[in-house]
Image (tube, rainbow, N blue to C red):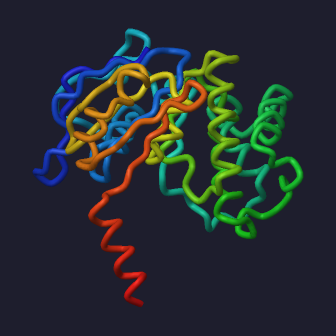
Amino acid sequence: MIRIQGLKKSIQNKVILQDIDVEISKGRLTSMIGPNGAGKSTLLAAVTRLIDFEEGSIEIEGRTITDYKSNELAKKLSILKQSNHTDLNITVEQLVRFGRFPHSKGRLKPEDYKQIDYALELLQLTDIKDRNIKTLSGGQRQRAYVAMTIAQDTDYILLDEPLNNLDMKHSVQIMQTLRRLAKQLNKTIVIVIHDINFASCYSDDIIALKHGRLVKAGTKDEVIQTNVLNQLYDMDIRIEEIRGQRICVYYDEAMLDQTLDSVQSN
């Protein structure tokens, strides 16, 4: 379990996170949702010790994150950031190998190769594993970075907008893969995601943030509620239930009328 209590983070005297109290349960897929500037990526970075914070505490399995040595934490928790270096002159497989560094220190053993092959197969990258990452599409490259993170084989996997640059097919593939890792391998998956319908359909739990504050945290059915989402996004969101899944339908009628008027006038 990850326990966050009283977290506050400011950047250049601007409060980014304020009074965040939330628990992330083990073996479940948790999505962070909210508008731009809500503090989602900052919260993820704080949990992974990429940034400091002024107040509060973060614990992983009962230990504060400051108690972990860097290599110990790297074996417990992995993260995929939004920005990845794409100018590296390496192949897909070589990139995925980086995920094994906390375990191998560059000297790969049979177990390391097993995890690398597993991650490549899981993300359907085996057939392009010898391609230079510079030659890949944005979506292929994103999947390669996700594979690198999974190859690290940590109990906790944190992904900041893993669906960036992915088409619908591969977005579904990634979400199904993450769901399977949580359900079958008891991995704790935390993702920052903008598509609330993906969050609704694939998550166990959801954390909703706005202006650096916690709006709601709970199971997906507790968060995917009209009153919660309307407050979160400042727009009307209708929820329909299809095959047991809550699907969000959202559009601004006034803006839609303006768009239609504009199209018709042209």
How far across and how far down the image is residue 16, in percent? 20, 45
Q: Residue furthest bottom?
A: 266
Between 6 and 245, the residue placed more toward the observer is 245
Question: Against 236, is 239 above or below?
Answer: above
Locate residue 38 relative to residue 15 in the image: left or right: right
Q: Residue furthest left?
A: 13
| Quarter containing the N terminus | top left
Q: Residue furthest top?
A: 62
> Can I make out residue 192 in this image?
no
* Residue at screen point 86% across, 28% down: 110
How far across and how far down the image is residue 128, in percent? 85, 56
How far across and how far down the image is residue 196, in percent? 45, 41
Q: Quadrant of residue 24?
A: top left
Between 166 and 39, the residue placed more toward the observer is 166
Locate residue 256 relative to residue 181 in the image: left or right: left
Question: Against 128, is 103 above or below?
Answer: above
> Can I make out residue 118 in this image?
yes
Locate residue 96 relative to residue 222 in the image: left or right: right
* Residue at screen point 35% across, 66% down: 256
How far across and how far down the image is residue 228, in percent? 27, 33
* Residue at screen point 53% across, 25% down: 29
Question: Against 202, is 81 above or below?
Answer: below
Between 1 and 116, the residue placed more toward the observer is 1
* Residue at screen point 29% across, 47% down: 236
How many marks the image carries: the answer is 0
Q: Residue furthest right?
A: 127
| Quarter containing the C terminus | bottom left
